Image: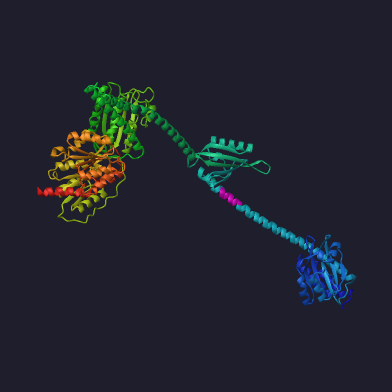
Amino acid sequence: MGSPVDDPGPLAAIAAASEAFSDAVPNVDALLAIVAEHISRATGDFCAVVLLSADGRYIEPVAAFHPDPEVLRDASAFLGVPIELDAAGPWKTVVQERRPLVLKIDPDNLPPNMAPHQARHMRKWRINEAAMIPMVAEDRVVGGLNLNRMEGSVPLGEAGLTLLENLATRAARAISLAQLMRDQKLTTSELESKVAERTKELTAANQFLDSVIENIPNMIFVKEAENLRFVRFNRAGEELLGFSRADLIGKNDFDFFPADQALEFTTADRETLGDRRLVDIPEETIQTKRKGQRILHTKKIPILDSNGEPAFLLGISEDITEARKVQEALLHAQEEAERANRTKSQFLASMSHELRTPLNAILGFSELLGDDRSDRFDEATRTRFLSQIHSSGQHLLQLINDILDLSKVEAGQMELQLQTVELGSLTDEVRSSVEPLARSKTITLFTEPSPELRLVADAGKVRQMLLNLVSNAIKFTPAGGRIQIRRRRVDSWVEIAVSDNGIGIAEADLGRLFTEFHQLDSGLGRRQEGTGLGLALTKRFAELHGGRVSVESEPGKGSTFTLRLPLEGPAVRASAVAAPLHIATRDLTRPLVLVVEDNPHAAEILARHLDNGGFRIEVARSGPEALTMARDLKPVAITLDILLPGVDGWEVLNRLKADEVTRNIPVVVVSVVDNPALGRALGAFDYFVKPVDGRALLSRLSEYTFTTQSKAEPVRVLVVDDEQANLDLMEALLTPEGFSVLTASGGREGIVTARSQMPNLILLDLLMPGVTGFDVVEALRAEEATRSIPIMVLTAKAITEQDKRVLNGQVAAIFQRNSMAGPELTDWLRRIVAKRKSS
């Protein structure tokens, strides 16, 4: 059975287990395992240690021991399995009453509410007594000792139970201390973890804030409230002010700005801190180190401490300099648009008068003539009426042309027809045009003698500019006045000055002088007629040439307008570097043609046309080279460009014809420049702009071999136009001169008539509905029978570069650079060669 209760062996073992707690080692699990082992070995019984949950609802076996491994293995299944206190039976009493409890157990008659696994354990190991001793610390039950005694075990006795209670008390204290230390350690660990996590979050937040501040395009700065020294600056602030952070931190405004401005900033900062509110400064100007003066939009915000006192001043400044410039530009543009609108409205009001005046004259006189059924007007009166109608029509046409020219310039569609212009003869033409008007006002026109001057320009535009300036001078010069025209060369420029002793112009009006649709004297009482477009057009035409027009004037003393144009014409993009021209055929039996052309691409195109036509080619790239090669090579013909560097084509032509060796060599002008420039540039043999000058048209027709004087039968001319009035006009103009006129009222009818009637010449309008003039040219040139009929373009259409490309090469007789009619040119050259051989 074992020792009696008072046997010192078991008691000593229990006491030894109790001593295990004397060191107060806070390893709870180890202590509880020691206690269970010592008690089990002392009593020979199964001993388990249970702990009470913090909420007092469960007990949980955490340590157990029995000398028999099989018993221990069977009982270990209970470890770690919480048991509700209500279902634990006696343990509820032990916990609530905080006293030991010893129960006798009949393993064959167990309570029905006992847990099944516990009941099996009791029956298997014949448990007949259970002792439960609470572990109490600081008036709180933390757990207990559980002894399951088997049959034959020695009873505990009072002494043993007391020792177990003492052991339980010590164990409770140790558990309580260990739990406290564990909780403290856990709390410390949690605190350290939370501190580390919070530190990480704060670091990330600071990094994010730093990144935001650094990447904001506006200047951000922070000043200490006490001394207004900078403590923070972002990259945008460095770039704006031109100082590094090392230069800025610890300094104040007086270290960077003028004293008066720094004092202004400091005063505003103190007021902001004192008011404890945000201040918005819409505009302030600062002087920066590298960017000069900048305009800033600044907001200043006081940063308060926990006591509500200002600790720092936050500033955010946006550089609005460029935005202000844009705003000012927009305002200026708006003002300009409004001014232009007012000016155009004023112009329309003026034009309503300017257009109605000639229209009224045309309508009035034509109505008088139409109603003259009783012949009340004699021949002289009718002639005067017709003259008035004609002059009014010319005036009306000029007004419309000025408006259209200005519109084309503004739209970028005005094209210059460049040629070499002899300034002396052009000035004489202008003077002849205005002399009748000058004589009517007894104004003297004087042209100052000058050396011969030539320039590359659009002759028509130069004539119009000079005419505008001289006409303007006559208009504002009083009777008996004097106008002087002076021409001179200044370096690579030509200057034409028109001076008068007229009314002069106030300095305040000079800036508006060349404004479109504007007349300086444009009030209700204005004395001079006109649309105010002449000077504006002159300015635009001069700029198209790469020149300019200026004015000097003094009220009451007169004005001087100076037109300045480049000698070599408007600047153009440089051509590609000339490359050697390689034409494979070098057959010396072929006739030689000298091509005079400085543009390598144009020279190659022309050379290949000639090579295909059976000619041998040499190329001269300048005037002097052309003269030398012409004397040395004696070609059968020369193709000559006019716009050559240095010595131009006209001078080359003069020297060729003056030289006995070269004077008989046929020369073909192949250039963008010709006379008449526009028609030759098209590739047609002539070009007229509606309304047609009848005398000029007849004069031009008389130059050709198919005129009425050279044939027994009249020359048949086909006029193709969709306007019946134009057809009637051409018929009335040509029939009295001996021409047989055929008419076609549209492109389709024109093609049919040309095929059936085979006229000697076609006068063709370009702008027709449906089948256009371009279509007519293409159709006629596609057929062998009609291909050789000469075509004269007769249109009011403004010819574009695209039009030139379409027409070039389609019309025979005249040749033009960059889109040459190769076959026609070679045919002509063959005829020249054949003629020379036959002679």
| 345 to the left or right of 759 | right
Q: Quadrant of residue 195?
A: bottom right
x and y percentages locating residue 257 in the rendered image: 53, 38
| 524 to the left or right of 646 | right
x and y percentages locating residue 543 in the rendered image: 33, 37
Residue 690 visible in this rendered orientation of the protein = no
Residue 283 visible in this rendered orientation of the protein = yes
Q: Is residue 18 magenta?
A: no
Q: Nearer the viewer, residue 516 or 682?
A: 682
- Range drawn in magenta: 205-212
Q: Nearer the viewer, residue 371 or 212?
A: 371
x and y percentages locating residue 435 in the rendered image: 24, 26
x and y percentages locating residue 523 in the rendered image: 39, 24
Q: Residue at x 65, y 54 (%)?
A: 198
Magenta stretch: helix, strand or loop mostly: helix
| 655 to the left or right of 472 | left
Q: Nearer the viewer, residue 456 or 627?
A: 456
| 232 to the left or right of 442 | right
